[in-house]
Image (cartoon, helix red, strand yellow):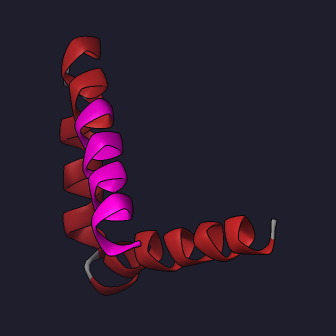
Amino acid sequence: MKLLFSALALMLVLEGIIPLLAPKLWRETFQRITRMADGQIRFIGLSSMLLGLIFLFIFK
């Protein structure tokens, strides 16, 4: 459980870097994402999950 919370904390830190350093870029990117079709967003989510799983297996 401790490892899960550590991973969640690291994810929040990494996701906070772009809004902190480049808020305008983050806002523009978010606006582009809201204009995407549901299928495109699902594909990005699936790709992100698969890449994360691959990284877990490689670096474990």
The answer to whether residue 5 is left or right of residue 27 is right
Q: Is residue 46 above or below residue 4?
A: above
* Near-viewer residue (49 or 22): 49
Which corner quadrant of the image does residue 24 belong to? Answer: bottom left
Write the start and end of the magenta stretch as one range: 46-60
Magenta stretch: helix, strand or loop mostly: helix
Q: Is residue 57 above or below residue 22?
A: above
Q: Quadrant of the N terminus?
A: bottom right
- Position in image of residue 58 (x %, y %): 27, 66
* Near-viewer residue (2 or 16): 2
Which corner quadrant of the image does residue 49 belong to? Answer: top left
The answer to whether residue 28 is left or right of residue 10 is left
Picture mark count: 0
> Farthest bottom residue?
21
Residue, x 35% and y 59% (percent of image)?
57
53 drawn magenta? yes
* Near-viewer residue (5 or 41): 5
Residue, x 70% and y 73% (percent of image)?
3
Q: Quadrant of the C terminus?
A: bottom left
> Farthest right residue?
1
- Position in image of residue 56 (x %, y %): 38, 62
Residue, x 22% and y 25% (percent of image)?
43
The answer to whether residue 40 is left or right of residue 23 is left
Residue, x 34% and y 54% (percent of image)?
52
15 drawn magenta? no
